[in-house]
Amino acid sequence: MGSKNKLKRFKENETFDNVFQPTRDELTSGNYSLKGKWREKVFKNENPLVLELGCGKGEYTVGLAQRYPNKNFVGIDIKGARFWRGAETAIEEDIDNAAFVRTQIELIEYVFDANEVDEIWITFPDPQIKYKRTKHRLTNFQFLERYRKILKPDGLMHLKTDSEFMHGYTLGLLHGLGYEVLYANHNVYKLEGSPEEVTEIQTFYENQYLEKDKAITYIRFKIN
């Protein structure tokens, strides 16, 4: 993507009423105005709140919002030029239960309040295989602790990935920590019984993986 195109998307994001771009200082001050008030101020209902972390182009956030109109969805990514596509699609198609936040995922507990979130989806994250990159792995212990702070006690976590390493690492960590694994599948398109929201919503890159016959894995679990 050219720099002019990125700049155009950044400017358009500023005009979208479904895009929120708090500064790091605004969040870490502890006074972010939407923290604890996403249902009230953004969605104006009391429906369950669901996050997609590392939402990329926003396809999964929008797909889930279309599939579940009685839930609210927030896609989160640091790269606003990517989720511009999802934000624009939501506006064009009058999908009012989808929003997007441009921020780093390690700041998640400053964006949402304790017990404010019902579910979290992590879709096709970078597995950060190299040891020195472990701290950036979205299912490491430190990140799970961040999610636990904002999830309701019975909140659900979902991990969908093409990385066998990420799938195995996360399963091992969950079992080691004694967290509850509700469902695990190492090839959702080849094995029967896969949840429909896992197989019927596909991202651009997922379609590329499937064309190469790459296995897509999925875990549903609880961390409270």
Image (tube, grey):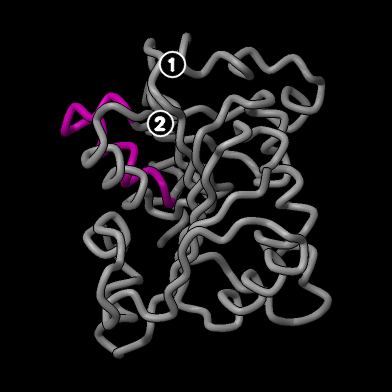
The span picked out in magenta is 82-97
Left or right: 10 as drawn, with respect to 117 = left
Q: Secondary structure at mark 1?
A: helix
User: Could you tell which of marks 1 and 2 lies nearer the N-terminus?
Assistant: 1
Callout 2: 10 Å neighbours few (<14), some, many (20+)? many
Query: How far is disc 1 from disc 2 in space, using C-alphas?
Result: 8 Å
Query: What residue would you read off at disc 2?
Result: 99
Q: Quadrant of the C terminus?
A: top right
Q: Amino acid at mark 2?
A: Ala
The image quarter in which residue 179 lies: bottom right
Left or right: 170 as drawn, with respect to 183 = right
Q: Position of residue 202 (x, y in %)?
A: 28, 63
| Dot 1 and dot 2 residues touching (CB under 8 Å) | yes
Label annotation for residue 175: none
Residue at 19% in and 27% down: 94
Residue at 30% in and 60% down: 195
Left or right: 207 as drawn, with respect to 142 = left
Residue sitting at the far bottom: 212
Query: What residue would you read off at disc 1?
Result: 42
The overriding secondary structure of the stretch rendered in magenta is helix
Q: Nearer the viewer, residue 99 or 102?
A: 99
Q: Nearer the viewer, residue 120 or 75?
A: 120
Q: Amino acid at mark 1?
A: Val
Q: Nearer the viewer, residue 171 or 6?
A: 171
User: Does residue 15 belong to the magenta stretch?
Assistant: no
Q: Position of residue 57 (x, y in %)?
A: 38, 53
Residue at 79% in and 64% down: 135
Q: Position of residue 65 (x, y in %)?
A: 29, 37
User: Is residue 169 shown above or below 54?
Assistant: below
